Image: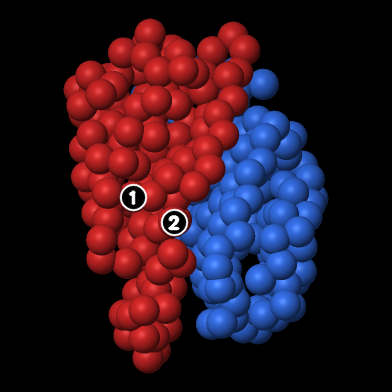
Chain colours: A red, B blue
Amino acid sequence: MKPLGRHVLAEIYGCEYDILNDIGKVEKIMVNAALEAGAEVREFVFHKFSPQGVSGVVVISESHLAIHTWPELGYAAVDVFTCGDKVDPWDACNFLTEQFCAKHLTAKETKRGILPDIPLQEAVNL
Amino acid sequence: MKPLGRHVLAEIYGCEYDILNDIGKVEKIMVNAALEAGAEVREFVFHKFSPQGVSGVVVISESHLAIHTWPELGYAAVDVFTCGDKVDPWDACNFLTEQFCAKHLTAKETKRGILPDIPLQEAVNL
């Protein structure tokens, strides 16, 4: 019973307001987080809210990275879902924590898609 | 200590191959799931993999809905993250389960962004 993927939900606190409220910076950091973790970026979309906050997602061959920011609280809700053994979702989370100049990260990992007898070659869409 | 949001990770099994492998159908069902749950759709992006599978995300004012499908396994990995009290992520999960003609749903909810003394009006980006 091998899971298809790993999904990390990360609470990133104490981030810099000016980064979390800048859609260009958030988008660039998220795409770079995917690349740093060794993922293949397929699509991405980001949205800026008024008066503040950014939401966005990077779709990767191995699943996705998503973010929602509350600059006024210094808080970013991140989740990183990866399939296969090539990409480690924790690498992306740690990169984001560093890039947001965050004071604190709490995160937990959930195994996704636990099905019996899945050949490994079917575990990643390439 | 009121959480900012609720994040449901849903494993949807026994889905119909022809639905999970059709990017148009998956996109339409995901957008409708957001609307059925009362969310406001901001952006969406979907990607079709070869030979099979679809990944995509709907960004909503209240956070996001994401999906990754393995049609050959009849499996969809879904996550629905909502902020505020207006939208119930379980409504979207139940709608998706029905629309995918799924046999089985297992899901769990995680509270996101538990910070002290957050005024309710700051909890949702509108």
The N terminus of chain A - image quarter: bottom left
Image location of residue A105, percent across then percent down: 23, 34
Q: Is residue B85 visible?
A: no
Residue at the location (60% across, 54% down)? B47
Residue that mark 2 sits on: A61
Judged from this view, the residue extending furthest toward the front is: B50
Left or right: residue B57 compared with residue B35: left
Image location of residue B82, percent across then percent down: 58, 41
Residue A126 higher or lower than A52, as above or below: below
Subunit that carries the residue with mark 2: A
Q: In the rendered structure, which amino acid carries the disc numbered 2?
A: Ser
Q: Is residue A117 visible?
A: yes
Question: Which one is in front, A14 or A47?
Answer: A47
Judged from this view, the residue extending furthest toward the bottom is: A117
Residue at the location (40% across, 68% down)? A124
Mark 2 or mark 1: whose residue is earlier in sequence:
1
Secondary structure of the residue carrying numbered label 1: loop
Left or right: residue B126 compared with residue A6: right
Residue that mark 1 sits on: A39
Residue B110 higher or lower than A15, as above or below: below
Disc 1 residue crowd, few under 14, some 14–19, many 20+, Cα 10 Å: many
Subunit that carries the residue with mark 1: A
Image location of residue B1, percent across then percent down: 40, 31
Residue B61 higher or lower than A71, as above or below: below
Q: Are marks 2 and 1 in contact (CB under 8 Å)?
A: yes
The C terminus of chain A - image quarter: bottom left
Left or right: residue B97 compared with residue A45: right
Q: In the rendered structure, which amino acid carries the disc numbered 1?
A: Ala
Residue at the location (49% across, 59% down)? B9
Secondary structure of the residue carrying numbered label 2: loop
Using the numbered discs, state the Cα–Cα distance from disc 2 to disc 1 in whole angstroms. Answer: 7 Å
